[in-house]
Amino acid sequence: MATKELLTDVQSLQGTIKVPGDKSISHRAVMFGAIAQGKTTIEGFLPGEDCLSTISCFRKMGVEIHQDGNYVEVISGGIDNLIEPREVLDVGNSGTTIRLLLGILASRPFHAVLVGDDSIAKRPMGRVTKPLSEMGARIDGRGNGMFTPISIRGGNTVGIHYHSPVASAQVKSSILLAGLFSKGITTVTEPALSRDHTERMLGAFGAKVHRDGLSVSVEGGQSLAGTHIQVPGDISSAAFFLVAGAIVPNSRITLENVGINPTRAGILTVLENMGAELTVSNQRELNGEPVADLTISTSSLKGTEIYGDLIPTLIDEIPIIALLATQAEGKTVIRNAEELKVKETNRIDTVVTELRKMGAEIEPTNDGMIIYGKKPLHGATVNSYGDHRIGMMLAIAALLSKTETVLERSEAIAVSYPNFFDHLQLLCK
Ligand SMILES: O=C(O)C1=C[C@@H](OP(=O)(O)O)[C@@H](O)[C@H](O)C1
Ligand SMILES: C=C(OP(=O)(O)O)C(=O)O
């Protein structure tokens, strides 16, 4: 486990960077390529540990995958060519990998065992194993199929109409992926719109997906065809530099080619509501995904309230938004975000504990947190607890500290942003 001395007392951030490829889209491009007939080429792939776990799982099921940095080729004979893995499928730290993979395996007439790291072992899998079992997959696991290790023997699944209790793209995608190869129609209705990359990308692979308000349906018996996918930059990675640019004095940063899909771009709404100096330019589309360049400058910020349908559109950005709020005038209240408790860590606890060590005034609530702003931050020894987003948030917080700040378990950052510290160094003037 690595410990890193963080950059502190930074006077200015200046420059232009391209953040790495979107993690959600990179996972899906590999997975859909692996179950499509023919060759899929992926440009702008994120070579972070989570997406590499996805590649490794599909290789163990006989799919030919060549990866060189951010370029990937997936060659497959289609979903029927997946073979029963001889080894355990290890998803590492990746919730997206295990939940979407279970959806794909639900229709496969073979056995597989899925495991992950200590964090994955604590995350709830019942949210997908229950509906997939209802569709006919035979699933077992620790705690009656609620936690890893999980074993699955799929085949002969039938479509369901599932009313998901949570707005989760992992749940929605898992069931839809099972539905594509099941009998009849599968529909998922969610309480609020979660990220819709699956729906958008399935279209590019030739599948038919029907949306009606908060419901999305697929018909069984479809086949996918290999295609070319260009992955936009990850707004969840860009978020760290958007906040850095807004809170570090004398700063101006441009982030090029960032995905701004409205189901992901809630942080832009929050930045605007808080009064940030943000411009969105050069808007265009990449594979049905909206993309833009984002420029942020040092801003005079005010507190805000974040709740309701906005939450799923910024769920992974809440740790860095909490830091943003420590530098705003007045109070920021985050509600309806109980999903934070089941991420890589309980992100309500880890955000509050670690930011308090640096002098922030922040209180946990049952479903979010309350942050009292305009608090100077000071140095401390802080910990990512193995959570990449907590680690990066703390590295941005340290920029404001006048004294030494040390990050324990800094290696976690490679899960989603392997060159994060290089980019940070590049921008520091
Ligand atoms: O589908 C995806 O790619 C993701 C969905 C979200 O999780 P939930 O589906 O659990 O909300 C998000 O937090 C995760 O980082 C990636
Ligand atoms: C929650 C996250 O990812 P996953 O669920 O795929 O582990 C994340 O990247 O913040």
Image (cartoon, grey):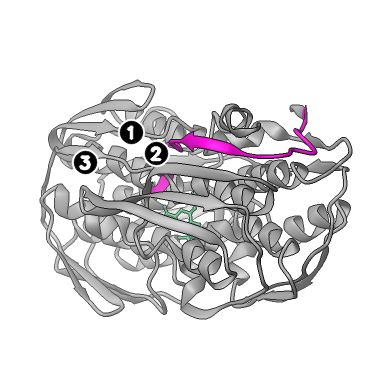
Residue 384: percent from left, percent from top: 72, 43
Residue 174: percent from left, percent from top: 35, 57
Earlier residue among tags 3 and 1:
3
Q: What amino acid type is highlighted by mark number 2?
A: Gly
Which-is-in-front pick, marks 2 and 3? 2
Residue 218: percent from left, percent from top: 18, 65
Q: Which SS class for mark 3? A: loop
Q: Give the residue number, with chain letter if any, for mark 2.
A: 21
Which image quadrant: the N terminus?
Answer: top right
Earlier residue among tags 2 and 3:
2
Q: Which mark is residue 44?
A: 1
Residue nearest the viewer, comparing 351 with 66? 351
Q: CA distance from mark 3 to mark 1?
A: 20 Å
Secondary structure, magenta segment, majority class = loop
Mark 1 near ligand 1 (CB under 8 Å)?
no
Image marks 3 and 1: residues in contact by CB distance under 8 Å: no
User: Residue 318 vs residue 152: left or right?
Assistant: right
Q: What amino acid type is highlighted by mark number 3?
A: Ile
Give the residue drawn at x 67%, y 40%.
12
Q: Which SS class for mark 2? A: loop
Give the residue drawn at x 83%, y 61%.
375
Residue nearest the viewer, comparing 184 with 251? 251
Q: What amino acid type is highlighted by mark number 1?
A: Gly
